[in-house]
Image: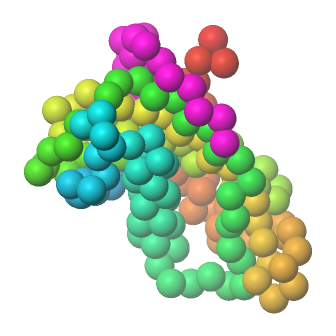
Amino acid sequence: MRVEFVSDGSDMVSRVSDIQNSSNSPRPHSVEIALRWGDQDSLGHINNVQIARLFEEARVRTMSSWFGGARSGYAGVIARQEIEFASILHYSDEPVRVDVWVPRIGTTSFDFGCALYGADGALAALAETTLAGLDLRTGHKMVMPENVVAVLQANSGDPVPLRRRR
């Protein structure tokens, strides 16, 4: 996992805003997640490991929403994850929001794009996670089933605006 701190998230905010407002991109799926008091570290902000877990929770809830319990012998396992931090996320009684979309669909893998916003609406972090298709019966890589690809295509959007792409 590549983790990078971004000292000024202002240009990132505009790039995420461009994704959400683009006529070529559907509105991403949004998930609200409650923070826990224990998510904070000794510096008084939400720990970076907990932020990775918030992205995980958003992906799991999104997959459940998109596919229900139907697995058809297919599962996605994480092959790569990249996170860029835009601002410090502080604890709040109000939930955070994670917007989720699919910026890339391959034959045997796809990418989840995620944008995490604090309760105040400020962008806290971006993530891009590659999930590789796994045949649950054999444990080997597999081509994604057509029904999976169709759902992913219905939720596709622009690339995650990570700094390395500037």
- Coloring scheme used: rainbow
97 versus 87 height, above or below: below
Which residue is drawn at the image coordinates 38% and 43% (left, top)?
Answer: 47
Q: Seen in the image, is 96 located left or right of residue 50?
A: left
Does 6 appear in magenta?
A: yes
Residue 7 seen in render: yes
Whole-percent x and y of residue 98?
Answer: 36, 46
Q: Which of the 4 image quadrants contains residue 2?
A: top right
Q: Seen in the image, is 17 located left or right of residue 118?
A: right
Q: The magenta stretch spans which residues?
A: 1-22
61 versus 91 height, above or below: below
Whole-percent x and y of residue 8?
Answer: 40, 11
* Front position in the image: 15 or 10: 10
The residue lying furthest to the left in this view is 93
Whole-percent x and y of residue 23?
Answer: 44, 28
Q: Seen in the image, is 54 located left or right of residue 136?
A: left
Whole-percent x and y of residue 166?
Answer: 63, 11
91 versus 162 height, above or below: below
The residue lying furthest to the front in this view is 42
Q: Which of the 4 image quadrants contains residue 128?
A: top right
28 versus 36 height, above or below: above
Residue 160 seen in render: no
* Front position in the image: 3 or 81: 3
Which residue is drawn at the image coordinates 50% and 23% (left, top)?
Answer: 5
Does 73 appear in magenta?
A: no
Q: Which quarter shows the N terminus? A: top right
Q: Seen in the image, is 52 located left or right of residue 13?
A: right
Q: Which of the 4 image quadrants contains residue 46?
A: top left
Which residue is drawn at the image coordinates 54% and 54% (left, top)?
Answer: 154
